[in-house]
């Protein structure tokens, strides 16, 4: 099982980020999410989704998926997003294993079905 | 107020350069629920100090669909009455998570200031470095100063500083629903604006039930076929403006949504870049994000090309002036003339109904008919729908699209979230108080 992200369908609404953090905190927050809508390139209208799994950071960009092994040196040609650094400190995706009624919360709550189960 | 709340009201006295905090009492929520219900109460409490009240709805920033909105309540220089302007994009949510449910700004500062509000802390900061700069420069500078590209701002540009009647409070780099000249009010207070960032936690009384019901409602919402559409061109088409989608298609880049809002109502136009570009543009300012359907239509109707209309919208956002007022009142028909007219915009625009809510929102249903008929019934529904949206914090454009977002389920979620018994009778009384 894996999380599949279609960055071109994503509308950058942050629902995934909210419900992921809820799953960790039992309250509403954004701080603990292992999936975030990256949105720091606002003037360029460039956005997508970052997902931290146990060993990898998945960057779902509009132009395609990028999978970075955590601990490896980043591509010097690509500027890091402001969202990426705190992500590395967070727990990796556990597919919301404790949320029996839902499955992964980001999948259940994505309003545009940009996040699905593979 | 323990739940769905930060429990705090911030009161900023610009005369005395003082910041105070008040507790948000549960009894006030039981009486006024939230959003503009409480903002109006706070406005009246501090009325002698010409306050601006910035607030969030009771459900803002939660899992209730489209719980994106906040609001600005103040006396409008345009109408002379107290009006309510929605706070959209991701800004409404950031306000709540920055640590305050409501912010009252009263008095006038001796020198330009901005308010830096983050993680439950508020500072009155010197704005001399950004005073005189446009909205884009100011937002960029504050983000650089704080070192956080996700800082959310509510700022004025030169129009507000110069006292233009149609000066607009802009959100980040973009135009806002402000048709009330609130930017002039900010400028008169020597207030460049506010900057928000927060990592707070909002507690919920019954979190599992709240989230479960949110998902049930979201699933009902997703049954709507209009959710196959995106962007403001489709909204205008649904409102009978058939040619707009084709007109903007050649410069349309992508559509984005406000927080947790299922319809992407913001459309990015690429003006100096290939609109089909998927990679990040190497240009600093490739285009403009548009949420104001009537401003876009206004520039189309004066005869601008879509690229020039985009450039006009961008220039308005930088200058901090209401682009709809510019399109309606400038009397100009070329981009350069329009850009040169910003300091001389005057005249009247029509604020519908009782004048409380912004005609940035269409004054009727979108995509669905809500079983309404007749002009009077539609206007009464629209005003009530706007009031309800701004009490609970629902994106006000989306609430005009989506019948599944009902007063009943907003009250149900509010009660689940707060452990208070919030009834239809209370909501009716709050709406009556707002509508007068």
Image (cartoon, coloured by chain):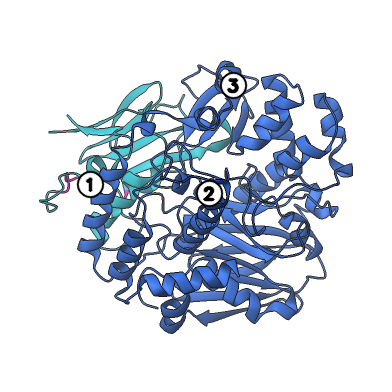
In this view, the residue in front, B252 or B150, is B252
Residues flagged by tags 2 and 3 on a common chain: yes
User: Does the magenta segment cover residue A66?
Assistant: no
Find residue A3 and report its horizontal and vertical position in percent: 21, 34
Q: Secondary structure at mark 3?
A: helix
Q: Classify A13 as above or below A29.
A: above
> What range is drawn magenta here?
A89-96
> Dot 2, how many residues are within 10 Å of its Cα: few (below 14), some (14-19), or many (20+)?
some
Chain in blue on the image: B
In the rendered structure, the colour chosen for chain A is cyan
Q: Which residue is mark 3?
A: B248
C-alpha distance separating marks 3 and 1: 35 Å
Residue at the location (47% across, 60% down)? B388
Pinpoint the chain carrying mark 2. Answer: B
Q: Specify the label residue B378 is tagged with.
A: 2
Q: Classify B282 as above or below B434.
A: above
Left or right: where B260 falls relative to B145? left
Left or right: where B100 falls relative to B64? right
Residue at the location (21% across, 56% down)? B212
Residues flagged by tags 3 and 1 on a common chain: no
C-alpha distance separating marks 2 and 3: 29 Å
């Amino acid at each position: 099982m894996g999380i599949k992200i279609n960055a071109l369908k994503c509308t950058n609404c942050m629902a995934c980020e909210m419900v992921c953090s809820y799953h960790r905190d039992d309250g509403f927050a954004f701080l603990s999410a292992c999936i975030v809508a990256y949105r720091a390139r606002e003037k360029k209208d460039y956005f997508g989704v970052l997902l931290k799994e146990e060993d990898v950071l998945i960057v779902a960009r509009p132009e395609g998926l990028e999978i970075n092994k955590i601990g490896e040196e980043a591509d010097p040609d690509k500027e890091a997003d402001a969202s990426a650094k705190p992500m590395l400190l967070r727990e990796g995706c556990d597919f919301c294993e404790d949320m029996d009624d839902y499955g992964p919360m980001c999948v259940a709550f994505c309003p545009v079905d940009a996040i699905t189960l593979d | 107020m323990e739940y769905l709340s930060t429990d705090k009201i911030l009161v900023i006295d610009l005369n005395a350069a003082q910041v105070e905090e008040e507790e948000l009492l549960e009894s006030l929520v039981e009486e006024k629920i939230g959003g503009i219900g409480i903002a109006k109460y706070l406005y009246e409490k501090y009325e002698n100090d010409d306050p601006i009240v910035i607030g969030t709805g009771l459900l803002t920033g939660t899992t209730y669909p489209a719980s994106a909105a906040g609001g600005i309540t103040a006396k409008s220089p345009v109408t002379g009455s107290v009006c309510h302007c929605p706070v959209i994009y991701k800004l409404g949510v950031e306000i709540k998570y920055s640590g305050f449910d409501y912010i009252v700004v009263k008095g006038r500062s001796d020198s330009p200031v901005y308010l830096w509000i983050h993680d439950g802390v508020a500072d009155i900061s010197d704005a001399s470095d950004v005073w005189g700069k446009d909205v884009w420069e100011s937002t960029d500078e504050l983000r650089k100063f704080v070192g956080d590209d996700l800082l959310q701002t509510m700022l004025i540009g030169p129009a507000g500083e110069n006292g233009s009647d149609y000066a607009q409070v802009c959100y980040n780099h973009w135009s806002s629903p402000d048709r009330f000249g609130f930017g002039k009010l900010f400028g008169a207070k020597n207030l460049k604006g506010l900057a928000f960032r927060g990592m707070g936690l909002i507690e919920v009384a019954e979190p599992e039930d709240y989230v479960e019901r949110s998902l049930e409602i979201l699933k009902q919402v997703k049954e709507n076929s209009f959710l196959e559409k995106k962007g403001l061109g489709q909204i205008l088409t649904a409102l009978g403006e058939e040619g707009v989608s084709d007109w903007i298609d050649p410069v349309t880049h992508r559509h984005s949504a406000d927080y947790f809002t299922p319809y992407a109502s913001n459309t990015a136009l690429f003006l100096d870049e290939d609109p089909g570009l998927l990679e990040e543009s190497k240009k600093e300012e490739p285009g403009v994000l548009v949420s104001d359907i009537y401003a876009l239509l206004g520039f189309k109707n004066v005869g601008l090309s879509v690229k020039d209309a985009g450039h006009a919208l961008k220039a308005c956002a930088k200058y901090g002036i209401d682009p709809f007022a510019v399109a309606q009142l400038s009397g100009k028909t070329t981009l350069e003339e329009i850009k040169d007219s910003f300091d001389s915009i005057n005249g009247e625009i029509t604020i519908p109904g009782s004048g409380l809510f912004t005609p940035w929102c269409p004054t009727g249903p979108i995509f669905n008919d809500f079983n309404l008929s007749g002009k009077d019934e539609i206007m009464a529904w629209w005003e009530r729908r706007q009031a309800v949206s701004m009490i609970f914090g629902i994106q006000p454009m989306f609430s005009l699209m989506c019948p599944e977002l009902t007063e009943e389920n907003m009250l149900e979620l509010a009660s689940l979230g707060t452990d208070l018994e919030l009834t239809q009778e209370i909501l009716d009384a709050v709406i009556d108080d707002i509508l007068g």
